[in-house]
Image: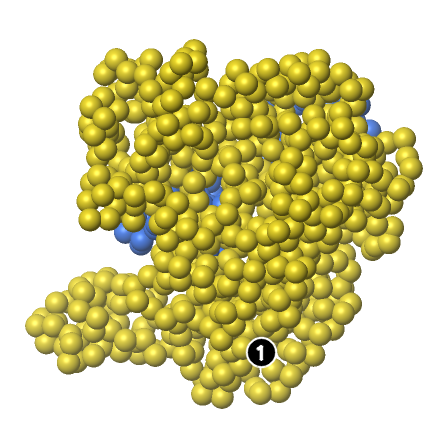
Amino acid sequence: MVNKKTNVPFTGTKVQEDMLLNVINEHRGVKGSLISVLQKTQDIYGYLPLEVQKIISENTGIPLEEIYGVTSFYAQFSLNPKGKYTVSCCLGTACYVKGAGKFYEQISNELGISTGECTPDGKFSLEACRCIGACGLAPVMTVNDDIYGRLTSEEVEKILAKY
Amino acid sequence: MKNPFELNELRDSMKSAVALRVNNSAAVTDSADEYTYRSNVLVCGGTGCTSSGSAKLIETLRREIAASGLEKDVKVVPTGCFGLCALGPIMVVYPEGSFYSMVKEEDIAEIVREHLKEGRVVTRLLYQETVKDGVVGDLAHTPFYKKQMRVALRNCGMIDPEDINEYIAMDGYQALAKCLTEYTPERVIEIISASGLRGRGGAGFPTGTKWRLAYNNASEQKYVCCNADEGDPGAFMDRAVLEGDPNVLVEAMAIAGYAIGASQGYVYVRAEYPIAVKRLSIAIQQAREIGLLGSNILGTGFDFELEIRLGAGAFVCGEETALMTSIEGRRGEPRPRPPFPAQKGVFGEPTILNNVETYANVPRIILLGSDWFSSMGTEKSKGTKVFALGGKINHTGLVEVPMGTTLREIIEEIGGGIPKGKKFKAAQTGGPSGGCIPASKMEVPIDYDNLVEIGSMMGSGGLIVMDEDNCMVDIAKFFLEFTVDESCGKCSPCRIGTRRMLEILEKITQGKAELSDLDKLEELCNHVKMNALCGLGQTAPNPVLSTLTYFRDEYLAHIVNRKCPAGVCKALLSYFVRPDRCKGCTMCAKVCPTGAIYGERKSPHTIDQKICIKCGACIDTCKFDSIIRQ
């Protein structure tokens, strides 16, 4: 799991912070809701920079190290900003036995990045995921919420060109 | 809803909404009401078919129906999975039961005009297995469905998962009503125990026993949890239930709550299943609105609430103690047992945790009795099991068969065999915790105990088929990469042991291993199996051990001959042009990224082994099968 700290400067706005405080208030008193709060926070900021984790800590009383422990544990949480389009290539078993490894390499080569990284122009980030459950269509890739199945290498090229 | 009578009233009034599908006949005209239509068109809205574009089909279908003035005659129902994902998008028209497969947008107008308006089935677009000599037959008689028995999936592809009324029309919540009004909690547990239901999540622990343990632990607050964190790559049974019949889970968890004395439930679902999460939220919301969740359910004084917790992408959270820690909002690390969850689970209180498919069986067992359930299956494994068929198989999709069905029946008969005339090599069950079953074990009846005996395990039900082009060492390495990636790091046998195992496997696939490495690998496997803290670590060696048992010759070929017989492991491969077949079309030379292929037009080409990076682009491009990999 790649989850290094980022060097990208934090550019959170007041509006985002207000939204975050709302989320924290909504979950006040709900037992064990830290993960839910972090999931909603990531929807607001796109990722979970340390600055934001500090705000959560200050407003919930949960120690920062505990929050950081959670954000760095789960694959869903990103400490790095993501690209406008998140390209995700499924490397689950069904896709893998149908040659998904090759397509992952192809995408990685064409974008010039590997898992967890973002292209310098901020357009694409790449992930390798483990099964989205569309095994009937293997091999599968997704770009944000769009799912593409029964991949071939020409298909992959066309899909990336679309964005 | 204040009492069971109101539930029955609602059920009876909704019967006409599903009558076309259940009775396969339109003979409800005498009791025609606002729910009566001439036709129901069911379109699969599961993840598989949605990915094949079914959402757009539904839109077009509704538009065409409106344009033909058929809104009052035809109802469009988005449903859950029909199982035959390979042929999606799927669309079924009732009362005829016409099964249209691989439907395209441009086909819709014809289906609406011909079938829905004129009543002429468009045979050309039907799933061809249902058509014999021009006559349309019953779907239940096709090879894919013939041997299936749908219990957990009974409503999937039958009802609108976003409408609780359709679930109620199919006798939904009757089991809950029966428990609350006729049975004591003890009696409910007795029925579940007597049915022989075992956990469908993998290990197969008897469900009734689990419930009894939690029942016996007195506490003010207990919890009922559902594991819907279907993390095994290649498994999507639970997703299908959540997407196709979410109410069955709500009902079953309420029954479990009544049985053990819990008033709060949590469903832990993967965030990667957005459609499932949405439909489950709708089901919970609707159940709450009509009083099937909340306080004083059906006027019986029983309170039960349900909350969804989204997983955040950690495979280890499928392990019960880790899942519970994650529900508490912390790092999902497992802890030693005892204490067992039935003693100290979520927030330190007695807790039961069952998997989605396990719950999906519960309401039927209550309604039809434990004898009905235990009449299916084998001696020690009762009922049915859902498998997600994937990999190198013609009918990828979801199947539900009685326990004891053989692998051969599932793969060859139901699954339609291996594509492109290739040879079956192995079937993988149990995901990263399971093993590979070779052709020689195809006739073994599949149940919990037999699978363990042949070195694999039931797991949650992923069944990946591999053919002669898959390298078993590479597959073992694939699973180890997965485990290394997902190991939480808490205990050293798993954290360090699996990494060392992976390193040995990498050496083997690169042709750098010695025979002694195999002994080290086996020793390490046994250490990790014995000493790891949780199920993830204890079962991580299974893919290696089972391939070592059944496919040792492949390991030896990699080590002794420095060859990969299946042609997968790059470092051991070379690409050659067969001069007798090459037509000199130059296609391969054009796609070669390193310019390693040279030759005159119209004469055989050659590959420069020093420059070749073994990417395989040439083999994919060649139309004459003239490039070989060995």
Q: How is the image coloured?
A: by chain
Residue A123 placed where, x, y %? 42, 38
Image quadrant of residue A44? top right
SS class, disc 1? helix
Q: Is residue B8 above or below residue A2?
A: above
Please indicate whether residue B233 sits to the left or right of residue A31 in the image. left
Q: Which residue is at a point 31% across and 36% down the rendered structure image?
A: B98
Camera-nearest residue between B536 and B613: B536
Quarter of the N terminus of chain B within the rendering: top right
- The residue closer to the viewer here, A82 or B176, is B176
- In this structure image, what is the colour of chain A? blue
The quadrant of the picture occupied by the C terminus of chain B is bottom left
| Residue nearest the observer in this picture, B428 or B71 | B71
Tell me the subunit letter for badge 1. Answer: B
The residue carrying mark 1 is B549
Of the chain colours in the picture, the one used for chain B is yellow
Q: Looking at the picture, how far across and down is residue A54, in whole percent?
A: 73, 32
